[in-house]
Structure formats: structure tokens, C-alpha cells
Image (cartoon, grey):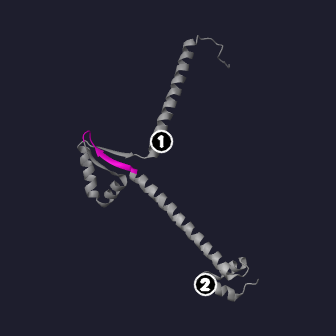
Amino acid sequence: MKVTLEMIDELRSRVNVTYEEAKEALENNEGDIVKSIIALERKRKEGSNNKAKKKEDFSKQANKTVNSFLSVRMILKNEKTTLVNVPLLIAVISLIVAPWLIIPGVVIALILGYKLRISSRNKTSDKIKKGLEKATKTVKKSTDKIFEDTEEMDETDDDSDEDEIIIE
């Protein structure tokens, strides 16, 4: 069936779409206005579901990022007491807002024997730390074995020329 301008105008008046979208919908549905309206509404609904999903994904990622920033903490403490234990993000914001208060306070705390520590207590940093410890142990074992083998070779070496290559 041929799509006419009147059919496109009728569809546009019922559903808020462009001429191009209306024409395409009518062509796909053989000129049936009701089927075209239903098809356009489904398309619009799918688009809004995709937007909602994208917003939800962005929200989850933003929440994860904020939590990772908040897991990094600035700690001022000595052997007995903890003076400050706040997220690093809050410490940086405080430094920007009131540097005349924060900088002298930290300097005085350091003079009084407090130690400044930046630490992260999240799963990723714990996994990295465990992996580094494992790698360090493996390297230590390997190097110890190499040194033991070298010492054994030195002890058995009796100045023989069998394993030497001399080029003159």
C-alpha cells in the first residue's frame, strides 16, 4: 500500500514523531496506522528502558568510585592515641577550604610525635598486597636455590679444565 502525506500527518498527530519516523513506521506496517502507532510506542519504550539501564549502570559505577575514594584514609596517630582518622578525600577538601588551619595543625602534630599515615583498606589493595608477598617469597626461594647451587659448584670445582673453553 502506498503511504500518503495524509496518513503521515495523521500518525504524527497521534504520536509525537518526525515525518521520517512516521513514514518508516507506515511502510513497515503496510500503511496500517494502528500497527504503526503500536510499533512506535514499543520503540519509544525500549529506548526509555535503555536510558534507565544506562543511568543505573552509571549510578553503580559512580557509587563504586566514591566508595574506593572513601576507603583511602588519612591517619594521624602516635603509640597511644589516634588524633585524626578521616577519608583522604575529606582531608583534601579540608585542606582546600581551610589551609591556614590544617597545615599548622598537621605540622604541630608531627612535631609532637604523631605519625601521618595514608592507608587503604579495600579488597583490591589487600589482593595486591598478598600477591606481592607471594611473589617476594617465590623470588627469595629461587635466589636462595641459585646461591646454594653456586656454592655447591664452587666446592666441587677442582681447577679442572674440562668445563672450560679457551680461545687463543
Residue type pointed to by label 2: Arg
Identify the residue under disc 2.
Answer: 14
Q: Which quadrant holds residue 35?
A: bottom right
**Label number found at residue 113:** none
Q: Which quadrant holds residue 115?
A: top left
Q: How many marks?
A: 2
User: Above or below — where is 47 with respect to 133?
Assistant: below
Residue 91 point in image, percent of width and height = 33, 54
Q: Is residue 78 part of the magenta span, yes or no? A: yes
Q: Is residue 110 left or right of residue 144?
A: left
Q: Is residue 9 left or right of residue 108?
A: right
Residue type pointed to by label 1: Ile
| Image quarter of the N terminus | bottom right
* Element class at badge 2: helix
| Contact check, label 1 and label 2, Cβ < 8 Å | no
Q: Residue at x 54, y 68 (%)?
A: 51
Q: Residue at x 25, y 52 (%)?
A: 104
Report how far apart the C-alphas of labels 1 and 2 lie in the structure: 59 Å
Highlighted range, magenta: 71-80
